[in-house]
Image (spheres, grey):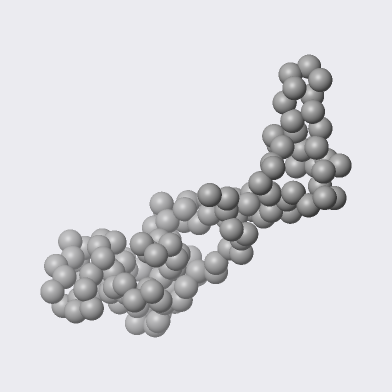
Amino acid sequence: PEPSDIRYRWECKACTKVWCVRCKVPWHDDMTCLDMKLKDKFKEGEKSMMELVKKGKLFKCECGKFIEKAEGCKYMRCSCGRYFCWACKQILGADHQEHDCTVKGLYVHEENDDEEEEGGGAVGAPFHFAPMVPHAPLPV
């Protein structure tokens, strides 16, 4: 911790556990109070992003990036270079013509396009990436 963070270190006389009264957690020898705060914000952001993944609103690529599909073809490419099918979430090679998706149609919402009412756009337009949550490096 920073020298200024030491003033928040408190040892309980009854149980001898050491706490950070500023962060309201057990004492964090390996990081500053600011790092703890950023770590918590990152965890909250990661949790809410994973909720969107579960709902099918985002896809988390193997590289760790979150991708949001606004509209267009279900065959997509992450900025890391991986190709995948939005509909079945299968990682593909560069030639997606060989992919035999179990979900019918070229466009994900081809038969029932409710996405328009939820803020989606016209079929055929490009996708965009979800905003990344800024964070400090997590301790190893």
Query: Residue 111 placed where, x, y %?
Result: 27, 68
Query: Residue 74 placed where, x, y %?
Result: 29, 72
Asked if 79 appears above or below 59 in the picture, the reply is: below
Q: Is residue 37 visible?
A: no
- Residue at figure coordinates x 40%, y 81% from the top left: 126
Q: Nearer the viewer, residue 14 or 40?
A: 14
Q: Nearer the viewer, residue 103 or 60?
A: 60
Left or right of 43? Residue 98 is left
Query: Residue 28 placed where, x, y %?
Result: 69, 41
Q: Nearer the viewer, residue 27 or 127?
A: 27
Q: Quadrant of residue 24?
A: top right
- Residue at figure coordinates x 39%, y 58% from the top left: 56
- Residue at figure coordinates x 53%, y 54% from the top left: 46
- Residue at figure coordinates x 17%, y 61% from the top left: 102
Q: Is residue 124 visible?
A: yes
Left or right of 41? Residue 65 is left
In the image as oriented, which residue stretches furthest toward the top? 14
Left or right of 23? Residue 125 is left
Q: Quadrant of residue 38?
A: bottom right
Marks counted in the figure total 0
Query: Residue 61 placed where, x, y %?
Result: 37, 64
